[in-house]
Amino acid sequence: MFTLFKSKPVLKDLIPDNHVDIHSHLLPGIDDGAKNFEDSLRLTQALKSFGVSQFITTPHVIQHVWENSHEQILANKNSTVEALRKNNISVPFQAAAEYLMDDQFVRLFQSEALLTLKDNYVLVEMSYINAPIQLYSILFDLRVAGYTPVLAHPERYLFYHKNINEYEKLKKAGCLFQLNLLAVTGYYGENITKVAENLLQKGLYDFVGSDVHHNNHIAAFDQKVKLKDLNPLKEVIGNNQFFKV
């Protein structure tokens, strides 16, 4: 009878060896993630200890906040890779970007190539305050331009929490969904955990990401997973092998 009370695992124990992390903020001094290379090194080493063997780091691109250009991101990535190598870390370390969907984003992808996770898969996000008015027009234009949008952390958009049908609508518009792993520990709050669990049960997630910015995120990987059924989460974690090089 004691199996009914079996303890839930901590999050880091669900990360398999050779995991590919597709969402993080590890490049130094480029957004609200790592402030310097020492941060980058510490965060990378920690994720590597959990089982991550390939990194696709994704600095923010946000108009008037983090206006990181294609060239700036790649230059920062190249110098970071070299510094990591000098510290005996030589795992695949790529850079894409996490693009805020706004009017500037439309002009950007219509005028130059985006930094993608793989092939045409591009990581996008929305404001936490509200969805863009022209959201579905942006998604349509993005797909016409040849990209497949991967929506970062849909569970964190509070304005959708009371209307689960909006998530179905986003999927029908061609969005893939990326779960923030810390959502299943309660790190962002109980309501977000419940929404993440609901979306997992409905099979709406495609991939996962750490979205690591700092040491508090790393520490949260030692928290227990607050899901009744771990199987959908394990399946989605396994989907990240799609990005393996």
Image (spheres, helix red, strand yellow):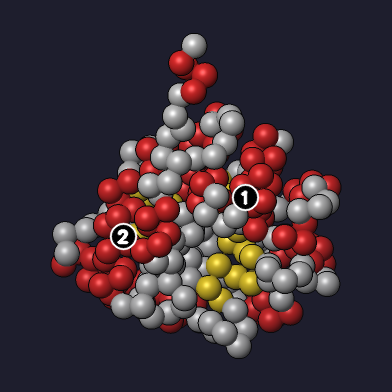
Q: Are marks 2 and 1 in contact (CB under 8 Å)?
A: no
Q: Nearer the viewer, residue 45 or 124?
A: 45
Q: Is residue 189 above or below residue 235?
A: below
Single out the residue that lies furthest toward the bottom.
64
- Is there any visible trace of residue 176 in the rendered image? no
Looking at the image, residue 76 sits to the left or right of residue 107; the answer is left
Mark 2 or mark 1, earlier in chain: 2
Q: Is residue 205 above or below residue 39?
A: above
> Where does residue 130 sit, x and y in percent of width and height?
76, 69
Residue under the image location 57 percent in, 57 percent down: 188
**Residue 100 % position (x, y):** 64, 72
Mark 2 Cα shell of 10 Å, populated few (<14), some (14-19), many (≥20): many
Residue drawn at x 41%, y 40% is 10
Quarter of the figure with residue 136: bottom right
Q: Residue at x 70, y 60 (%)?
A: 157
Q: Secondary structure at mark 1?
A: helix
At 22% from the left and 58% from the top, the residue drawn is: 89
Q: Is residue 154 visible?
A: yes
Give the residue pinned by disc 1.
190
- The dot on residue 221 is none
- For marks 2 and 1, give the CA distance: 28 Å
What residue does disc 2 label? 44
Which is more foreground, mark 2 or mark 1?
A: 1
